Amino acid sequence: MEIKTFGVIGAGQMGNGIAQVAAMSGLDVIMNDIKTEFVEKGIGNITKNLTRSVDRGKMTEPEKFAVLGRIKTSVELADMASADFVVEAATENESIKFQIFKDLDRICKKGAILATNTSSIPIGRIANQTGRPDKVIGMHFMNPVPVMKLIEVIKGLATSDETFDTTWELSVKFGKTPAEANDFPGFIANRILLPMINEAVYCLYHGVGKAEDIDTVMKLGMNHPMGPLALADLIGLDTCLAIMETLYDGFCDSKYRPCPLLKKYVEVGWLGRKTGRGFYEY
Ligand code: CAA
């Protein structure tokens, strides 16, 4: 199936990164969010990233403008009527995502594929909100999207092979390496990553070490590019908590219980980089 027009729902941290890689691969992109100020902020971030690439000699100025010229912004979901493939990258909240998929199912062309960038909500539950579960799939990008090479492609029980193959090929077109996962809580990436981050928060909570020391151990002792607490701040502590809760509820296993300190930080709005304070101050 040929994809020409690519829709992105959500212009935030993940959404604008996805719009950028799609436009860089030559697709026409529609980037949608609920408010003009959100899409403008998203375009601002893409412009900043592309300008940095020009400054570093990785892209020419005309190429930068060509990429920006391929991205249309939108604050009406109805604009997705022309998209062949849509990725939803809205807030990690089940009822918000369910409503978006119900609306997309009504608005989008019959053959359009509806993908979700969810980090933890079961693909089957999302697909069940639509009349086209065979065309619903998980396309899980990593943060920061323009830099990270992986896309986790998640098959729901009803996802068709054609939908899977198209999503896989699109991931390769984006210059990424796809990996296949099945629809279990946290899929592969977050099933492994989040318990590690949660354990790092427990180390802080139990006073085993200070944040800086916990991160230094993992960076220099295990060669991780950043420590787990700094990474939690990058991902967003609300997202980390939502994923831990999905693992805990999904497996009914106490080994996934979220650390009380993580809950406390989220309660007071210390969500990491995006609010200027998490385990570190920004
Ligand atoms: N957007 C775009 N580009 C960025 C960027 C951003 N937010 N942050 C860094 N970059 C680019 C820089 O411009 C730089 O580009 P050049 O090579 O062209 O100069 C390159 O990335 C390297 O950046 P830096 O030198 O500033 O810093 P670094 O070498 O320490 O790399 C990092 C930064 C890529 C973030 C690295 O620390 C890293 O890989 N960290 C781990 C990230 C990770 O684990 N992500 C997955 C999170 S889990 C997830 O996303 C899934 C989920 O559902 C929770």
Image: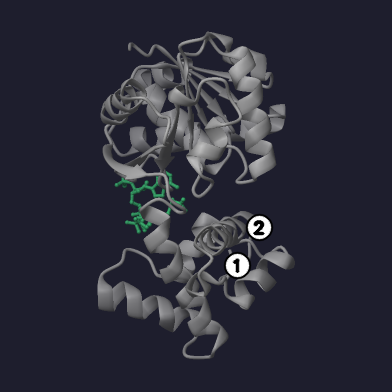
Q: Residue reaching furthest bottom?
A: 207
Image quadrant assignment for residue 44? top right
Q: Is mark 2 within 8 Å of ligand 1?
A: no
**Can you give x and y, in whole percent of width and height, for residue 12 in the image?**
58, 39
Residue 226 in view, yes or no: yes
- Badge 2 density bin: few <14, some 14–19, many ≥20, Cα 10 Å: few
Residue 44 in view, yes or no: no
* Up/down of 195 relative to 78, above or below: below
Amino acid found under the numbered disc labelled 1: Gly
Q: Nearer the viewer, residue 74 or 180?
A: 180
Image quadrant assignment for residue 169? top left
Residue shown at 63% from the left, 15% from the top? 106
| Horizontal side of residue 145 vs 131, given as left or right | left
Q: Nearer the viewer, residue 38 or 57?
A: 38
- Badge 1 density bin: few <14, some 14–19, many ≥20, Cα 10 Å: many
- Quarter holding the N terminus is top left
* Up/down of 208 relative to 42, above or below: below
Report the residue marked by disc 1.
Answer: 278
Residue shown at 41% from the left, 36% from the top? 157
Amino acid found under the numbered disc labelled 2: Thr
Looking at the image, do the residues carrying marks 2 and 1 touch, with CB atoms under 8 Å apart?
yes
Residue 6, numbered label:
none
Tell me the distance, in whole angstroms, between the alpha carbons under discs 2 and 1: 8 Å
Residue 275, numbered label:
2
**Can you give x and y, in whole percent of width and height, for residue 194 in the image?**
45, 63
